[in-house]
Image: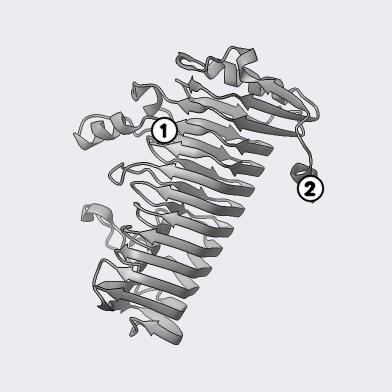
């Protein structure tokens, strides 16, 4: 086992000592930043402690690891971090909290309340609004653990993992209304060796979205709903695009979501691919399109590309998927004519619609089914 996993933090730094105020009124952004800088000067291990209370973090907070001397840093949060009432203060920033170039970092506990509802209202009213900030983003980092975190009402994505290696996300809760726009629960791209375990995600977009360049991803024990399901994609946004490979989703539960297990790509030329994906042991409760491959993805159906998707989808297994569909078509695979979906395998599937067997709709798909598959007719 690595020293990162074994060791305990030796130097403890309390954010109150740096001027943080747990009253939810005084901006504590600088205090948190100063505490991080001090932790980085510790040559061994450091823990930054945030006691109970409400801490206003009214500006973007960026933790950088390039100049860190510390062997490892734990950020333990027993309090609630709240965003500003004025959405514009964060809305024009890409992130609320970002960790850039860090390694051997643990984020333990805490609630992050971004107060995104005012920005969503602005967007719903068609006003000139900023895009919004992602609540928590890790970039160019490795050996990261995120455990016991609660993310509430993010302006945009709740958690994003970009260009990272060896990240473990455990026991996380994510909550936003089903009509909150673009509030993906966890977004992962261009990252390798990622684990997401025991997560409860209720949001207005994908519970988990998996972007280009994701390799060796394990998702285990996810409760999703409301939301748009677990999605690989959308892909084929660019011609030069990395593939997605070695993805496993186990023991997921979907409750009244817009999709279940989805792979989606734009109808556009691309050098990307999806390969070696395993969807194992999912339960569907009144889910629209429990199993979906959509290679003509174009939300809103305006200004859609008119090409065939270049994404090659190969070697995907669906096994042990049970439950009920909210749509008559429970299994839909709309694959590219130019690059059909290949080696699609289904086994032990039983999805019903209003008490009867649901329907399938499959185009440009090849593979095989083993044992009982209800509804059948796809392969």
Horizontal relation, residue 106 to residue 46: left or right: left
Please state which of residues 129 and 201 is positioned toward the viewer in this rendering.
201
Residue at label 1? 133
Q: Is residue 17 left or right of residue 314?
A: right
The mark found on residue 2 in the picture is 2
Where is residue 125 shown, x and y percent of the image? Answer: 19, 34
Q: Which residue is drawn at 34% across and 64% down?
A: 285
Tell me where residue 161 appears, x and y as whole percent.
54, 45
- Residue sitting at x 39%, y 21%: 84
Question: Is 99 in front, or is 256?
Answer: 256
Q: Is mark 2 on a helix, strand or loop?
A: loop
Crowding near the residue tagged with mark 1, few <14, some 14–19, many ≥20 C-alpha atoms within 10 Å? many
**Residue 73 on image: x %, y %:** 70, 32
User: Mark 2 Cα within 10 Å, few/some/many (few <14, many 20+)?
Assistant: few
Query: Is 46 rendered above or below residue 19?
Result: below
Please indicate, yes or no, whether residue 295 appears anywhere in the rendered image.
no
């Amino acid at each position: 086992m690595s020293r990162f996993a074994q060791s305990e933090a030796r130097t403890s730094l309390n954010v109150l000592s740096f001027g943080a105020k747990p009253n939810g009124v005084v901006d504590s952004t600088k205090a948190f930043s100063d505490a991080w800088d001090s932790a980085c000067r510790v040559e061994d291990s450091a823990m930054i402690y945030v006691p109970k209370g409400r801490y206003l973090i009214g500006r973007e907070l960026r933790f950088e690891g390039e100049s860190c001397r510390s062997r490892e840093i734990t950020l333990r949060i027993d309090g609630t971090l709240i965003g500003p009432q004025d959405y514009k203060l964060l809305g024009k920033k890409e992130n609320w909290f970002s960790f850039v170039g860090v390694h051997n970092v643990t984020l333990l506990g805490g609630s992050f309340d971004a107060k995104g509802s005012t920005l969503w209202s602005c967007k719903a009213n068609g006003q000139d609004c900023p895009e919004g900030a992602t609540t928590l983003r890790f970039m160019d980092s490795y050996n990261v653990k995120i455990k016991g975190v609660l993310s509430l009402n993010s302006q945009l994505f709740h958690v994003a993992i970009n260009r990272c290696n060896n990240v473990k996300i455990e026991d996380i809760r994510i909550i936003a209304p089903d009509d909150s726009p673009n509030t993906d629960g966890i977004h992962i791209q261009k990252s390798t060796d990622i684990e997401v375990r025991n997560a409860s995600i209720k949001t207005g977009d994908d519970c988990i979205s998996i972007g280009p360049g994701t390799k060796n991803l394990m998702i285990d024990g996810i409760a999703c709903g409301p939301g748009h399901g677990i999605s690989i994609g959308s892909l084929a946004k660019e011609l030069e695009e990395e593939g997605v490979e070695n993805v496993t989703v186990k023991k997921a539960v979907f409750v009244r979501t817009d999709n279940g297990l989805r792979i989606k790509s734009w109808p556009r030329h691309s050098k990307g691919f999806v390969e070696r994906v395993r969807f194992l042991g999912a339960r569907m409760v009144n889910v629209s399109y429990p199993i979906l491959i959509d290679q003509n993805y174009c939300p809103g159906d305006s200004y859609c590309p008119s090409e065939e998707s270049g994404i090659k989808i190969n070697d995907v297994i669906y096994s042990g998927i049970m439950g009920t569909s909210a749509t008559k078509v429970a299994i839909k695979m709309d694959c590219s004519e130019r690059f059909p979906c290949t080696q699609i395998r289904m086994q032990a599937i039983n999805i019903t619609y209003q008490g009867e067997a649901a329907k399938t709709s499959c185009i440009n798909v090849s593979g095989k089914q083993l044992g009982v598959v209800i509804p059948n007719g796809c392969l």
